[in-house]
C-alpha cells in the first residue's frame, strides 16, 4: 500500500513537470497509458526505499502502540527475533530490486525516454480560433472570422498560401464555407463559397518589375490540407539505446572499458604527437643550446635579420598551433572523462538501490518501535524526513562525483555510509527500550540539570 502511494505521488510530480508538453497534443489514451506505465516503472528506485521505510515504521509502530512488542519481550522474544522474518523479506526485496534495476529499468528508461521525446516534439492538436491567424499547418496561415454552432460552418475566411516560400504572394478569401475532417483524421477539407483568389505572378523575369496580379472569382472551391505532421512520429529507439541509463551492468562494463581504452589511446597519441616539438628535451646539449640566455647569441640571428624574422614567425606559428592542439585535446579528454564518470555512476547505482532498501528497513523498524505510533500520521512525517536526508545526501554525492570533486565510489556510497551507523544505533536503542523520542524523558533530564545548577 505504501509503495503504490509513494509511486502515485511521484507520478503526479512527473505529470506536473511535463504537463505543458502533454496537454493539447491530441494524444490518444493508449499513448498516454504507455507513457505513464513506463514512467511508473522508472520511478520505482525512488518509491521502493520510501515505501520500505514508511511501512516498517508503521508496522513496528503499530505493534509498539498496542504493547505487542512489550508482550513479546516479556515472553522472552527479543526485538531482533521479531525483526528476523522481516529482515529476510527485506533481503529478498533488495535482491529483487537489483535484478529490477539491472534488467527492467534500462528497458523502461529506453521506452519512456524515446516516447517522451516524441511526445515533446509533437505538434499541438489542430485548433483554429475565431479572429486569430492559425499557423499550425505547414505552408498556410488561416484566419476564420466566426464559427457557427453546428461545428462545421464558418464565415469570413482568409488563407495565405506560403507553400512556395515566396512570401504573401497568394491569398484566398471567402464569405462562407465549411470545415470537416476525414474519418482517418489525415486531411482537413475546407469548402469555400463566394470568394476570390489573389496571386502575384513572380515566376517570370521579364515581369519582375511590373508583377501582374492574377485575380480569380469562384462560387465554390475545395482545399485539402494534409495533417500528417500532426501524427505522433516515433523515433528509432536505436538512437537512444547507448545512453548510460538504458544499459544493464554487463553493457555498462563494456562501455566503461571502451571509454578507458579510448582515453588511454588518446593520451598515447597526444604524447606521440608532441615528441617532434620537444625532441630537444632528450638531448642535454640541445637543451643547453635552446636556453633563453644563448638563443640571442645564435649566429643566424645576428647575421641575417630576414632569416631571423622568418624563424621567429615560424616558431610563433608552431607554438600557436601546438597550443590550439593541446587545448582541443584537453577538451576532448574532459568530455570523454565526463561520459566515463556517468557510466561509472550508473554502474554503482545498480547496487545502491538494493543496499538502500535494506538500510532504510534497519532504520524504520527500530524507529517504529521507539516512537510507538502506527497509522499514517507521525510515521509519514518521520519517514519523509529520513528519506529527504537520504535523498539529499545521494544527490549531493552524485553531483560532486559528476563534477569530479570526489571519486565516484565515495559519491555514490556516502548515503549508505551515513545511514548504516544510524540504523545500527537505532537498533541498539530500540533493543534497550530507549526513550529516544519521549519528551517526558528530556523534560526530566533538564529538570534534574537545572536543580543541580541551583543547588
Image (cartoon, rainbow, N blue to C red):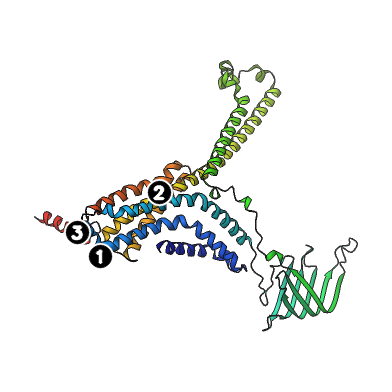
Report how far apart the C-alphas of labels 2 and 3 lie in the structure. 34 Å
Residues packed near mark 2 inside 10 Å, few (<14), some (14 to 19) or many (20 plus): many
Query: Sequence-wise, which precedes: disc 2 or disc 1?
Result: 1
Q: Is residue 48 left or right of residue 330?
A: left
Q: Which residue is mark 1?
A: 66
Mark 3 — residue?
441
Q: How many marks?
A: 3
Q: Quadrant of residue 196?
A: bottom right
Q: Is residue 188 left or right of residue 116?
A: right
Instruction: Tell us which disc is closer to us: 3 or 1.
Output: 1
Cα–Cα span, label 2 and label 1? 31 Å
Task: Mark 3 or mark 1: name the one nearer the start of the chain.
Answer: 1
* Residue denoted by label 2: 355
Q: Is residue 291 above or below residue 387?
A: above
**Where does the image place residue 313, in percent across and percent down from the top left?**
67, 29
Q: In terms of depth relative to the viewer, which is nearer, 70 or 437? A: 70
Q: Is residue 310 above or below residue 4?
A: above
How far across and down, in percent of the image, does residue 75 sit? 20, 57
Of 72 and 122, the residue lying toward us: 72
- Image quarter in which the C terminus is found: bottom left
Quadrant containing the N terminus in the rendered view: bottom left
Secondary structure at numbered mark 2: helix
**x then y, percent, for residue 199:** 83, 70
The kind of secondary structure element at disc 3 is helix
Task: Give the foreground label among 2 and 3.
Answer: 2
Residue displayed at 57% across by 62% down: 34
Q: Point out the residue furthest to the top here.
A: 285
Above or below, 441 relative to 267 = below
Between 309 and 129, the one lying in front of the other is 129
* Residue at the image point whose x is 11% and y is 54% from the top: 452
Q: Residue at x 88, y 66 (%)?
A: 210
Q: What residue sits 63% from the left and 33% below the top?
A: 320
Amino acid at each position: 500500500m505504501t509503495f503504490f502511494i509513494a509511486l502515485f505521488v511521484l507520478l503526479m510530480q512527473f505529470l506536473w513537470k511535463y504537463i505543458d508538453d502533454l496537454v493539447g497534443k491530441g494524444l490518444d489514451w493508449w499513448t498516454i497509458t504507455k507513457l505513464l506505465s513506463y514512467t511508473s516503472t522508472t520511478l520505482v528506485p525512488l518509491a521502493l526505499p520510501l515505501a520500505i521505510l514508511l511501512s516498517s515504521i508503521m508496522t513496528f509502530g503499530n505493534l509498539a502502540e498496542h504493547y505487542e512488542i512489550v508482550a513479546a519481550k516479556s515472553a522472552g522474544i527479543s526485538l531482533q527475533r521479531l525483526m528476523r522474518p522481516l529482515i529476510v523479506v527485506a533481503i529478498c526485496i533488495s535482491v529483487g530490486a537489483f535484478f529490477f534495476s539491472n534488467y527492467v529499468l534500462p528497458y523502461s528508461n529506453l521506452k519512456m525516454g524515446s516516447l517522451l521525446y516524441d511526445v515533446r516534439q509533437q505538434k499541438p492538436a489542430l485548433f483554429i480560433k475565431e479572429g486569430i491567424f492559425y499557423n499550425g499547418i505547414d505552408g498556410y496561415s488561416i484566419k476564420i472570422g466566426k464559427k457557427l454552432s453546428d461545428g462545421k460552418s464558418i464565415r469570413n475566411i482568409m488563407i495565405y498560401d506560403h507553400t512556395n516560400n515566396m512570401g504573401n504572394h497568394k491569398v484566398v478569401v471567402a464569405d462562407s464555407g465549411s470545415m470537416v475532417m476525414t474519418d482517418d483524421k489525415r486531411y482537413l477539407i475546407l469548402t469555400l463559397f463566394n470568394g476570390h483568389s489573389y496571386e502575384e505572378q513572380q515566376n517570370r523575369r521579364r515581369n519582375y518589375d511590373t508583377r501582374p496580379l492574377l485575380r480569380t472569382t469562384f462560387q465554390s472551391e475545395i482545399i485539402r490540407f494534409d495533417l500528417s505532421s500532426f501524427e505522433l512520429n516515433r523515433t528509432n529507439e536505436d538512437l537512444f539505446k547507448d545512453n548510460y541509463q538504458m544499459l544493464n551492468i554487463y553493457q555498462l562494463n563494456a562501455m566503461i572499458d571502451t571509454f578507458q581504452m579510448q582515453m588511454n589511446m588518446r593520451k598515447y597519441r597526444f604524447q606521440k604527437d608532441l615528441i617532434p616539438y620537444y625532441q630537444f628535451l632528450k638531448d642535454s646539449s640541445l637543451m643547453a643550446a635552446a636556453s633563453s640566455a644563448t638563443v640571442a647569441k645564435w649566429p643566424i640571428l645576428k647575421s641575417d635579420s630576414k632569416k631571423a624574422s622568418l624563424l621567429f614567425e615560424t616558431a610563433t606559428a608552431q607554438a600557436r598551433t601546438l597550443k590550439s592542439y593541446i587545448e582541443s585535446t584537453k577538451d576532448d579528454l574532459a568530455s570523454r572523462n565526463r561520459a566515463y564518470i556517468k557510466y561509472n555512476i550508473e554502474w554503482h547505482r545498480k547496487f545502491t538501490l538494493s543496499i538502500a532498501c535494506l538500510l532504510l528497513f534497519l532504520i524504520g523498524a527500530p524507529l517504529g518501535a521507539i516512537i510507538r505510533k502506527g497509522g499514517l500520521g507521525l510515521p509519514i512525517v518521520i519517514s519523509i524526513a529520513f528519506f529527504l536526508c537520504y535523498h539529499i545526501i545521494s544527490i549531493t554525492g552524485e553531483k560532486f562525483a559528476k563534477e569530479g570533486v570526489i571519486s565516484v565510489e565515495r559519491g555514490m556510497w556516502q548515503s549508505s555510509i551515513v545511514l548504516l551507523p544510524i540504523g545500527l544505533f537505532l537498533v541498539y536503542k530500540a533493543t534497550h527500550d530507549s526513550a529516544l523520542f519521549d519528551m517526558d524523558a528530556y523534560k526530566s533530564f533538564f529538570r534534574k540539570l537545572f536543580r543541580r545548577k541551583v543547588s
